[in-house]
């Protein structure tokens, strides 16, 4: 039984050009005008005989030309004739091989003490031993940065030291993009024999490959079963009251394996120190969410990770987190009043864990600012040049500010607030209104957007026309709480008992989240993912490198520190996309799957009889035959 295959099957489309001579012959064929000369009847009979002979000649030439085009098209497609009677040759003609190596982190899955990536490197080493100095090799990995430096055309073999340095990546290139890169490099090699080989664990989405060059997949050893547990989330739970030097973290584990996992060890790490651990059980093909409580050693930004102990796949064991923790937030109260209103004083005492200490405006200095995270301004009196300088410095240093209005409002302070918040402050009003709108898109008020307020009346407040301000709370189209960056303005009279909203459970939530947001103590709503753009002035990468600029594409998981060694320091947790943690086995369509004896199936031109030279020889012979027929006909037509 024989088999005919084509190395460049996509080029068979050019065989359609075979019909071009036939179309030209049909369209160009013209019927001559009929003119009869009675005295020249014998000439007419001679012409009829000549016409019959010419018609046969033209049909023969037409067939020859069509065969020439067909044979050339088939030769370009590189047909290979295979038969059990034809033994594969031990030698092969010079060939360009492009190896597409999957280096997504799923290739780090280990079984029997060896990962899929290690098996893939061994396969590349075997390919090196089978190549001749005349061959050309190209290695394309899933790592774009690696390809920019090393995806070159190598003569004879790929340097072994380069192969050993290959590592997995968390942001792999799409397979079609890698295939296109391989095709480009093969065309640059200018070799007549070109082949593409894919080495992958096949843990990918179903995909169809299209290429004009033959693509084959080299199999990797697969175990009997797949077992993997991934830690896919780590969420810091908020603490509104009763703050302690502890923090609860909710984490999620996903068991992608085929068996239940019991007594799995989970560790919590903060600042490279293990602060807690826990044993959990995870059913097969399910996920669980658990909470672990960690000890916090000091105030400030905390960062670390939750880690599940799973030796088969270590690349998805960690999920990073970062959060600010201030057991006693540093609040400064700027006021000329002898004491604070009850609602405001109680709020500050519960939030900061201490009795509020009032700082008079005249005693405040620039050197005191870095001792506080934010300031609350209540009845500051007149806006003196010194106080205005202090407020400008607070804004420049990105410290938080909360303006709580009282019964009186100085004209200079009113002008300052108009400019700072984009409003037009007017008179104080005692007309009762009910809160009807809460901004659901802002961190401060998002939790209250769908809540029904039992006490929503505000009966003592300052009227303001909001021009460009960001309203947090409104009542009857009247803005009552405004936000501009890390600065807040409460237009209700904080000292008035007529505002029953202060007795609603929603008020302390709103107040605490305002203080958290302005002081930089708000919990990140979600972690970032690899591939997202990070904005910063100065950034310390997980590896310790310091970069400056404006934006950076996160390319590795870990903790990124923004504005390090400054009062504005903050931490950013970046985690991976966990899609490669799943148990998948998808062979790309459009690629031929080689068996365990794949080494014997490389260099396809040696596996059968390559017919392209034979076809070109026949086509050349037909060209010679066509020329001979034309010359003979020309000689016959001469007198």
Image: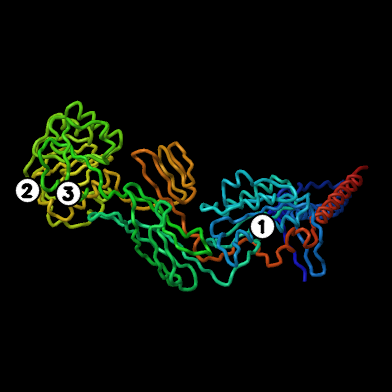
**Residues at badges 1 and 2 in contact (C-beta under 8 Å)?**
no
Q: Residue furthest top?
A: 385
The residue that label 1 is drawn on is 197
Q: Nearer the viewer, residue 29 or 175?
A: 175
Q: Residue furthest bottom?
A: 259
Write the residue at 75% across / 52% down. Answer: 95
Q: Give the mark toward the camera: 1 or 2.
A: 2
What whole-number distance in Å separates the C-alpha atoms at marks 3 and 2?
18 Å
**Residues at badges 3 and 1 in contact (C-beta under 8 Å)?**
no
Please provide percent x and percent y for residue 603. Answer: 74, 58
What whole-number distance in Å separates the C-alpha atoms at marks 1 and 2?
78 Å
Look at the numbered disc 3 and give the secondary structure of its residue.
helix
**Residues at badges 3 and 2 in contact (C-beta under 8 Å)?**
no
Look at the numbered disc 1 and give the secondary structure of its residue.
strand
Please provide percent x and percent y for residue 566. Answer: 36, 38
Please provide percent x and percent y for residue 251. Answer: 38, 61
Disc nearer the start of the sequence (3/2): 3
The residue that label 2 is drawn on is 498
**Neighbourhood count class around disc 1 (C-alpha, 10 Å): few under 14, some 14–19, many 20 upward:** many
**Can you say whether 363 is above or below 18 in the image?**
above
């Amino acid at each position: 039984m024989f088999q005919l295959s084509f190395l460049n099957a996509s080029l068979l489309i050019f065989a359609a050009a075979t019909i071009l001579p036939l179309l030209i012959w049909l369209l160009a064929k013209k019927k001559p005008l009929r003119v009869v000369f009675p005295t020249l009847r014998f000439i007419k009979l001679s012409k009829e005989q000549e016409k019959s002979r010419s018609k046969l000649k033209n049909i023969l030439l037409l067939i020859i030309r069509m065969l020439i085009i067909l044979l050339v098209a088939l030769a370009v497609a590189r047909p290979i004739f295979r038969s059990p009677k034809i033994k594969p040759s031990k030698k092969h003609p010079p060939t360009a091989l492009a190896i597409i190596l999957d280096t997504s982190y799923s290739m780090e899955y280990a079984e029997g003490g060896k990962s899929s990536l290690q098996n893939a490197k061994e396969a590349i080493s075997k390919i090196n031993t089978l190549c001749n100095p005349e061959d050309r090799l190209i290695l394309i990995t899933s790592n774009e940065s690696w390809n920019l430096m090393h995806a070159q055309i190598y003569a004879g073999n790929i340097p072994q030291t380069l192969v050993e340095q290959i590592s997995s990546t968390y942001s792999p290139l799409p397979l079609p993009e890698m295939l296109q890169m391989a095709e480009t490099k093969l065309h640059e090699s200018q070799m007549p024999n070109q082949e593409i080989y894919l080495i992958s664990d096949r843990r990918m989405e179903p995909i169809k490959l299209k290429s004009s060059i033959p693509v084959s997949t080299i199999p990797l050893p697969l175990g009997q079963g797949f077992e993997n547990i991934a830690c896919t989330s780590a969420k810091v739970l908020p603490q509104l009251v009763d703050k302690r030097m502890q923090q609860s973290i909710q984490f999620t584990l996903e068991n992608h394996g085929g068996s239940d996992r019991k007594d799995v060890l989970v560790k919590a790490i903060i600042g490279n120190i293990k602060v807690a651990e826990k044993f959990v059980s995870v059913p097969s093909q399910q996920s669980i969410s658990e909470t672990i409580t960690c000890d916090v050693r000091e105030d400030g930004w905390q960062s670390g990770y939750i880690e599940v102990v799973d030796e088969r796949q270590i690349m998805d064991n960690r999920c990073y987190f970062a959060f600010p923790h201030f057991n006693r937030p540093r609040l400064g109260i700027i006021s000329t009043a002898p004491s604070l209103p009850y609602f405001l004083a109680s709020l500050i005492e519960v939030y900061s864990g201490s009795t509020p200490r009032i700082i008079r405006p005249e005693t405040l200095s620039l050197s005191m600012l870095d001792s506080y995270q934010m300031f609350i301004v209540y009845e500051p009196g007149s806006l003196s040049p010194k106080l205005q300088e202090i407020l400008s410095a607070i804004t420049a240093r990105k410290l938080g500010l909360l303006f709580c209005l009282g019964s009186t409002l100085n004209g200079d302070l009113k002008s300052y607030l108009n400019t700072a918040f984009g409003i037009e402050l007017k008179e104080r009003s005692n007309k009762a209104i009910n809160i009807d709108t809460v901004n659901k898109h802002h961190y401060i008020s998002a939790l209250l957007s769908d809540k029904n307020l039992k006490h929503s009346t505000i009966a003592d407040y300052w009227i303001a026309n909001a021009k460009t301000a960001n309203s947090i709370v409104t009542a009857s189209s009247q803005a009552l709480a405004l936000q501009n960056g890390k600065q807040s303005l409460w237009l209700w009279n904080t000292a008035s008992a007529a505002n029953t909203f202060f007795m609603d459970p929603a008020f302390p939530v709103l107040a605490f989240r305002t203080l958290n947001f302005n002081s930089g103590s708000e919990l990140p709503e979600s972690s970032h993912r690899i591939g997202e753009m990070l904005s910063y002035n100065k950034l310390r990468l997980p590896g310790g490198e310091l970069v400056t600029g404006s934006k950076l594409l996160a390319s590795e998981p870990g903790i990124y520190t923004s504005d390090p060694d400054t009062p504005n320091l903050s931490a950013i947790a970046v985690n991976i996309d966990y899609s490669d943690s799943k148990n998948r086995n998808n062979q790309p369509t459009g690629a031929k799957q080689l068996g365990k004896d794949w080494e014997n199936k490389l260099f396809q031109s040696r596996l059968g009889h390559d017919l392209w030279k034979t076809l070109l020889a026949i086509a050349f012979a037909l060209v010679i035959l066509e020329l001979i027929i034309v010359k003979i006909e020309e000689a016959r037509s001469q007198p």
